[in-house]
Image (cartoon, helix red, strand yellow):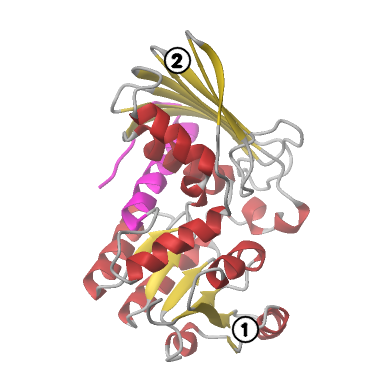
């Protein structure tokens, strides 16, 4: 069973309430023992509603709580770096939301700080934990479609009204669809293909939801170092499209439908010379599976499903896509 692990939530967020508290409590000998919110009343209400013993308004107070062994950071993006550095200095393990930071340099500093402190760092790229994505990866790596040639991701969704805040109007927090959704696509393809993105071209759209010139839609093409070309379509403004993931190879295609989602749903089909085969999927809660891997890493057994380095590389890809939309030029993905 192992030592009890107490979690501190840095940010009284929607994702913490809807997904992460339950995922933490689904792990043996794990519980949420504290929450921090700069808004005292919000923190107190959040703590009471979610049966969390302690509520703090300052990160130093939460990190000074001896019951806290690990933190989950889900504040706005511009705060991630300072909060991660503080947690590492306090000897707390860190699971951070994506994107890790707003710049590659800041993200690298975060990973280095956790490594130097000897604490586990993970990026909360939940899609890696989807049964659909794991099975697609297995099929690709087993040679089921021959040589991978192309990929397509359909991740154009409608941002729910309760999330239509800073993501649409606060550039200083890393708002916009690219740092919110494209960063997930990048990690998904790195995971499935076992390859690294090399360069990107992209066009963005402002369709009336985002403000101040921020993009609420994007179409991008990314080349990977195994020569796969990937097409990405991400948006906050599309209500009825559904999501999907396709990998096309020299000997077959993998078609995933309704798979770019937080929910443990979706279907995967293999299409080749023998016809179409529906692939059996063992669905489970994506966040609970991710927490299981993170807790095992704390106990010295393996690594998080998405490491800090994975978070750096997905951020680097998203930043290249963002730069391509601004420059109108093909942009190299820079990891250093």
Q: In which image quadrant can residue 94 be found? A: bottom left
Is residue 320 part of the magenta span, yes or no? yes
Is residue 18 part of the magenta span, yes or no? no
Q: Which residues are magenta?
A: 307-336
Residue appearing at x 64%, y 35% in the figure: 258
Q: Quadrant of the N terminus?
A: bottom left
Q: Position of residue 65 (x, y in %)?
A: 46, 91
Q: Position of residue 212 (x, y in %)?
A: 65, 47
Q: Secondary structure at mark 2?
A: strand
Residue position marked by numbered label 2 in the rendering = 252
Q: Position of residue 324 (x, y in %)?
A: 44, 32
Residue appearing at x 32%, y 21% in the figure: 227
Please, which residue is most extreme toward the left here? 116
Q: Main secondary structure of the magenta part?
A: helix
Q: In which image quadrant can residue 300 be found? A: bottom left
Determine crowd level at label 2: few under 14, some 14-19, many 20+ residues with C-alpha closer than 10 A.
many
226 or 199, nearer to the observer? 226
Question: Vertical placement of 16 versus 315: above or below?
Answer: below
Mark before the other along the chain sequence, 2 or 1? 1
Q: Are marks 2 and 1 in contact (CB under 8 Å)?
A: no
Q: Is residue 332 left or right of residue 123?
A: left
């Amino acid at each position: 069973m192992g030592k009890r692990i107490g979690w501190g939530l840095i940010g009284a967020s929607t994702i913490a309430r809807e997904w992460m508290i339950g995922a933490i409590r689904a792990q043996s000998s794990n519980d949420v023992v504290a929450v921090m919110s700069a808004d005292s009343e919000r923190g107190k209400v959040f703590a009471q509603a979610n049966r969390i013993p302690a509520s703090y308004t300052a990160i130093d107070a939460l990190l000074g709580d001896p019951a806290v062994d690990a933190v989950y950071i889900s504040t706005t993006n511009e705060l991630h770096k300072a909060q991660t550095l503080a947690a590492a200095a306090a000897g707390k393990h860190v699971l951070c939301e994506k994107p890790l930071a707003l710049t590659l340099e800041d993200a690298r500093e975060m990973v280095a700080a956790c490594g130097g402190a000897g604490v586990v760092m993970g990026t909360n790229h939940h899609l890696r934990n989807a049964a659909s994505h794991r099975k697609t990866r297995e099929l690709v790596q087993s040679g089921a479609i021959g040589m991978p040639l192309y990929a397509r991701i359909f991740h154009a969704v409608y941002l729910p009204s309760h999330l239509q805040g800073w993501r649409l109007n606060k550039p200083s927090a890393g708002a916009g669809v690219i740092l919110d959704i494209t960063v997930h696509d990048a990690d998904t393809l790195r995971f499935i293909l076992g390859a690294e993105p090399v360069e990107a071209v992209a066009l963005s759209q402002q369709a009336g939801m985002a403000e101040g010139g921020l993009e609420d839609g994007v179409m991008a093409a990314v080349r990977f170092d195994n020569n796969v070309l990937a097409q990405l379509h991400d948006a906050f403004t599309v209500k009825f499209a559904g999501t999907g993931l396709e990998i096309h190879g020299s000997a077959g295609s993998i078609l995933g439908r309704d798979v770019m989602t937080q929910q443990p749903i979706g279907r995967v089909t293999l299409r080749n010379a023998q016809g179409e085969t529906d692939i059996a999927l063992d669905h489970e809660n994506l966040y609970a599976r991710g927490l299981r891997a993170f807790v095992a890493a704390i106990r010295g057994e393996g690594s998080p499903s998405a490491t800090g380095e994975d978070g750096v590389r997905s951020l680097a890809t998203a930043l290249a896509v963002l730069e391509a939309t601004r420059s109108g030029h093909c942009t190299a993905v820079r990891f250093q």
